[in-house]
Image (tube, grey):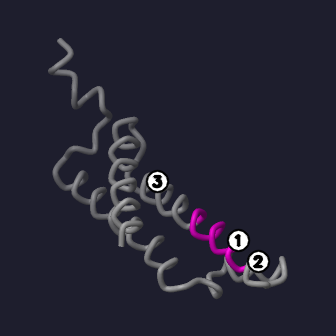
Amino acid sequence: MFALVTHSVLSIVGVLIFNGLGFPLPWIVFFISAVFYMREQGQREHDLKNMGWKTVRAWLGATFAFGWSFDNFLQWVVPTLVAIAVACLLFYTGYNLPLETLLAPYWQ
């Protein structure tokens, strides 16, 4: 449970930072999802090798997710869904602008 909360917070922070830097929201969500997928894939491959799986089989099991546990899926899917929700919120509220545009009134 703690991992899901921390992953979700990191996902929100990532979306806000990349949005502030001016990246398009679909690319931000894709990047956040890819980062958490790769994190889980690498962790799961290591776990499978420690469980005695051969190297290639462990890599295939981790890369194509047939060796994943339900917790691994959750730790990839939940931050991705949070990133999508934050991106949609930013898009529909009109705050999908670069950081300097949002803070310009305060810099003068």
Q: Amino acid at mark 3?
A: Trp
Residue 76 x, y percent position in the rendering: 48, 71
CB within 8 Å, label 2 to label 1: yes
Q: Nearer the viewer, mark 3 or mark 2?
A: 2
Identify the magenta region: 38-48
Magenta: main secondary structure equals helix
Question: Mark 2 or mark 3, which is nearer the start of the sequence?
Answer: 3
Q: Which residue carries the number 1 mark? A: 46
Question: Magenta includes 29?
Answer: no
Residue 95 x, y percent position in the rendering: 22, 44
Q: Which residue carries the number 3 mark? A: 27
Which quarter of the rendered picture does the C terminus lie within? top left
Q: Is residue 1 above or below residue 21?
A: below
Q: Nearer the viewer, mark 3 or mark 1?
A: 1
How many C-alpha atoms fall within 10 Å of the one at disc 3: few (<14), some, or many (≥20)?
A: few
Q: Nearer the viewer, residue 67 or 98?
A: 67
Q: Which residue carries the number 2 mark? A: 49
Q: Amino acid at mark 1?
A: His
Question: Residue at point 39% right, 37% down?
Answer: 22
Residue 12 x, y percent position in the rendering: 33, 53
